[in-house]
Image: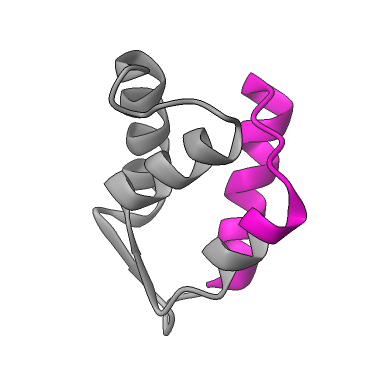
Amino acid sequence: MEEAIEKLLNELCVEWGFCIDQESVNKLKNSESLEAEEFAHAVLAAEGMNAELEIEWNRKIKRKFTERFGEVLNSNAS
């Protein structure tokens, strides 16, 4: 799971400029499981944004997550 999250976060950084701090990266990578909504909110919050107000970015990040992992990514996934 850690490698998969790292790859997705790298894509978000390169493609859209969402280059979050290492502490936030580590929290996401060390999660037991991660839902698309939770992931999108965490990325936006790490960038100092409010996911409730950033509807379009929230949707785009969730879509990228679900295309890759489905709605939930569990720690036993690679």
Residue lying at 41% horizontally and 20% vertically, measured from the top left? 57
Pick the front one: 20 or 71: 20
Query: What colour-coding does the image apply?
Result: one colour
Instruction: Give the side of residue 35 with respect to residue 14, left or right.
Output: left
Residue lying at 32% horizontally and 17% vertically, measured from the top left? 53
Relative to 56, is 17 above or below?
below
> Which quadrant of the view contains residue 26?
bottom right
Pick the front one: 49 or 66: 49
Pick the front one: 18 or 4: 18
Q: Indicate yes or no whether the magenta region holds residue 12.
A: yes
Residue lying at 57% horizontally and 58% vertically, measured from the top left? 5
From the top left corner, tell me how far across and down residue 55 is, in percent: 30, 18
> Which span is picked out in magenta?
1-24
Residue pushed farthest left?
71
Q: How many marks?
A: 0
Residue lying at 53% horizontally and 62% vertically, measured from the top left? 28
From the top left corner, tell me how far across and down residue 69 is, in percent: 36, 56
From the top left corner, tell me how far across and down residue 45 is, in percent: 50, 38
Instruction: Give the side of residue 28 with respect to residue 23, left or right.
Output: left
Residue pushed farthest bottom?
76
From the top left corner, tell me how far across and down residue 42 is, in percent: 46, 46
Q: Indicate yes or no whether the magenta region holds residue 42.
A: no
Magenta stretch, main secondary structure, is: helix
